[in-house]
Each structure stands twice: as structure tokens, then as C-alpha cells.
């Protein structure tokens, strides 16, 4: 069984970047890479800037039969604020296939998060409160882009694939530790590169 390691969250997009030559498509992949690193590092406010996201983003997120819609910047900001404020932003793909087109980015992944046994996400799972567990599931997603900026996230969860596995306590990483671990990766995705890439979409 693969156990989530935060340092692997760019593996899928890095593989796509190694195979894609189109400059506009590469720009979208670089936006996606920086977005993921910022989110897991807890720098969510740096995602929601004009160089990265349209003025009115829309997120449609499904999880275990429930759908959350964040319509507009205020609702998207609230979504990120609550995740990071609750210390629940250390997550990512165990396995990820990333494709890109003029429409945007397409993802199929096994998503994972390592949590303490007393986490709310484990309610009803019979978990030992003193244990450490990995929650994982499959999902597919589309991230449409307009003029080089993210329009939204549309995530579709494979509810039947959800699983919970006990893992070693050493697999648990705090938000502060994740931020430190991802700092070198974030340096490889500077904002200046994203800003410069937007010129590709100018008339």
C-alpha cells in the first residue's frame, strides 16, 4: 500500500510537463502546479490573485454523495480559509494522471490524507483515537481555464473507492512541517513565471 508523502504531490503534473510542448498548455500546468503547492503549504490567499484565478471562480466539489458549490470569490475564499484554519490542508494525490487541452486540465487520481484516529472524517469507522490512519479514494476532476487563469474546480468523487487504512504515526505531517517540506518545490514555481506566461494569452 502506498502511503501519502506530501513531497510527491507534483509528480503527476511534473510528468505532464515533461511530455507537453504547447506553451499555453504548459502555462496551465504550471498554474496547476503552483496552486497545489500553495494550497497544501497553507498559502491559500496567494492562489486567489488575478494572475492565478478569474474574478468569479466557481468550485463544484463532490464527496461521498454530497456536493459543495462555491460560487464566486467570497465563497471560494471561505472554503480555503476553513480548510487551512482547521489544519486540514495536508493532502494530495498518491497516484495522479494529468492531461491538458485548450479547455483546461483533466485529472484522474487517488487522493489521500493522513489523520489522527480522533479526526471527524473517521466518525463511524471504528478507528482507535490514538491511532493514525490514511483515508484514500479515487476522483476525477476538470479545471477549466480562461485566458490562462483558473475558472474553477469541478471534482467528482468515486464514493465506492473510499478506504481507511491504519498507518505508522510517522506518516502524519503537521501543516507547519508540510510547508517546510514543500518550500523547495514552491521555489521552482515562482509567481513571476505565471505572470509572464499570461502574455501568451494576450491578443
Image: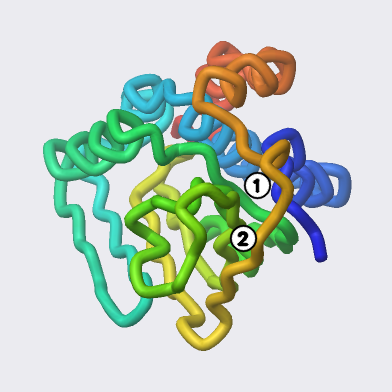
Q: Give the quadrant of residue 144.
A: bottom left
Contact, mark 2 vs mark 1 (Cβ under 8 Å): yes
Closer to the camera, 150 or 107?
107
- From the top left corner, tell me how far across and down residue 98 is, in percent: 69, 59
State the image quarter where residue 75 is shown.
top left
Lower sequence index among marks 2 and 1: 1
Residue on which the image places disc 2: 101
- In the drawing, does residue 44 fall left or right of residue 131? left
Depth check: give the residue in front, 189 or 55. Answer: 189
Q: Position of residue 36 (x, y in %)?
A: 55, 38
The Cα–Cα distance between marks 2 and 1, rounded to whole angstroms, is 6 Å
As drawn, the label of residue 134 is none
Screen quadrant of the C terminus: top left
| Residue beneath disc 1 | 25
Q: Residue at x 80, y 59 (%)?
A: 2
Residue 151 location in percent, x, y?
Answer: 35, 49
Is residue 148 rendered to the left or right of residue 173?
left
Amino acid at each position: 500500500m502506498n502511503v501519502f508523502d506530501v513531497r510527491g504531490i507534483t509528480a503527476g503534473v511534473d510528468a505532464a510537463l515533461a511530455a507537453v510542448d504547447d506553451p499555453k498548455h504548459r502555462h496551465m500546468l504550471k498554474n496547476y502546479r503552483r496552486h497545489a503547492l500553495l494550497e497544501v503549504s497553507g498559502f491559500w490567499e496567494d492562489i486567489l490573485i488575478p494572475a492565478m484565478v478569474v474574478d468569479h471562480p466557481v468550485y463544484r466539489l463532490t464527496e461521498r454523495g454530497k456536493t459543495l458549490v462555491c460560487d464566486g470569490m467570497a465563497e471560494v475564499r471561505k472554503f480555503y480559509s476553513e480548510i487551512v484554519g482547521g489544519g486540514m490542508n495536508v493532502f494530495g494525490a498518491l497516484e495522479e494522471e494529468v492531461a491538458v487541452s485548450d479547455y483546461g486540465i483533466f485529472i484522474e487520481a487517488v487522493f489521500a490524507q493522513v489523520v489522527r484516529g480522533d479526526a471527524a472524517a473517521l466518525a463511524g469507522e471504528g478507528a482507535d483515537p490514538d491511532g493514525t490512519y490514511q483515508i484514500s479514494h479515487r476522483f476525477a476532476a476538470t479545471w477549466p481555464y480562461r485566458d490562462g487563469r483558473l475558472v474553477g474546480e469541478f471534482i467528482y468523487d468515486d464514493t465506492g473507492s473510499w478506504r481507511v487504512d491504519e498507518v505508522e504515526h510517522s506518516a502524519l505531517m503537521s501543516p507547519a512541517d508540510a510547508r517546510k517540506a514543500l518550500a523547495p518545490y514552491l521555489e521552482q514555481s515562482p509567481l513571476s513565471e505565471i505572470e509572464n506566461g499570461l502574455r501568451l494569452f494576450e491578443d
